[in-house]
Image: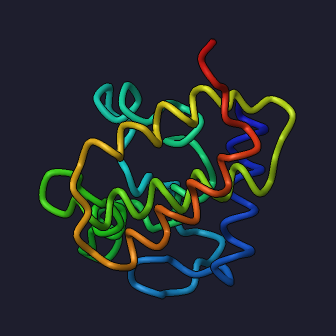
Amino acid sequence: MIAKYEEKKQQLLTQQDNCCSSCGEMFNGFTKIDLSHNLIRSRANIKLFGLLVIDHVSNLDATHANGHKGLFCNDNVIINRSTNPIKAYEKVIDIISHIIIENPPEVDYNELRRAFDNIKRYKLDDINSLSKYDMLEQLFEPFRIYDK
């Protein structure tokens, strides 16, 4: 568990050029670094989207711990489903498409499909959301399980 955490942390630090994703300040050797979930790791989100989506590296950002120089970097990267649903569901669509493209062997495509179907229940008026949604529908096509 700790090894996976450190692996994700190093991957994010490399992607973010060793800077905080919220304030842009460079991390030094003494800075406490947090991995912050964009979509928070709550029971409701886990039930709706599954652990695979919530704990994916695309849902994480390396940030300063809250309170660093009076900043709230960790809180600033959170995407709230109730106040910003379009952005939240776009994030879920991006994460699911990353998982499908990466195609790791341990992926449960039924869990991904459930997460995707849960997005369908919400009306997405944003054109970008709809185009991403259509793209994801096409990505799922090879994994579609038809009812007999």
Q: Residue at x 75, y 61 (%)?
A: 10
Q: Residue at x 12, y 59 (%)?
A: 83
Q: Residue at x 22, y 70 (%)?
A: 125
Quadrant for residue 45, please give it: top left
The answer to whether residue 122 is above or below residue 51 is below
Position of the C terminus, as image quadrant, is top right
Residue farthest to the right? Answer: 105
The answer to whether residue 38 is above or below residue 53 is below
Rendered location of residue 104, percent (x, y): 83, 41
- Residue nearest the observer in this picture, 32 or 39: 39
Rendered location of residue 122, percent (x, y): 23, 49
Residue farthest to the front? Answer: 148
Q: Residue at x 71, y 34 (%)?
A: 2
Residue farthest to the top? Answer: 148
Rendered location of residue 121, percent (x, y): 27, 42
- Residue nearest the observer in this picture, 3 or 57: 57
Question: Number of labelled discs?
Answer: 0
The colour style of the image is rainbow
Residue farthest to the left? Answer: 83
120 lies left or right of 26? left
The answer to whether residue 108 is above or below residue 71 is above
Quadrant for residue 36, please give it: bottom left
Position of the N terminus, as image quadrant, is top right
Quadrant for residue 84, please give it: bottom left
The answer to whether residue 35 is above or below residue 18 is above
128 lies left or right of 87? right
Rendered location of residue 14, percent (x, y): 74, 74
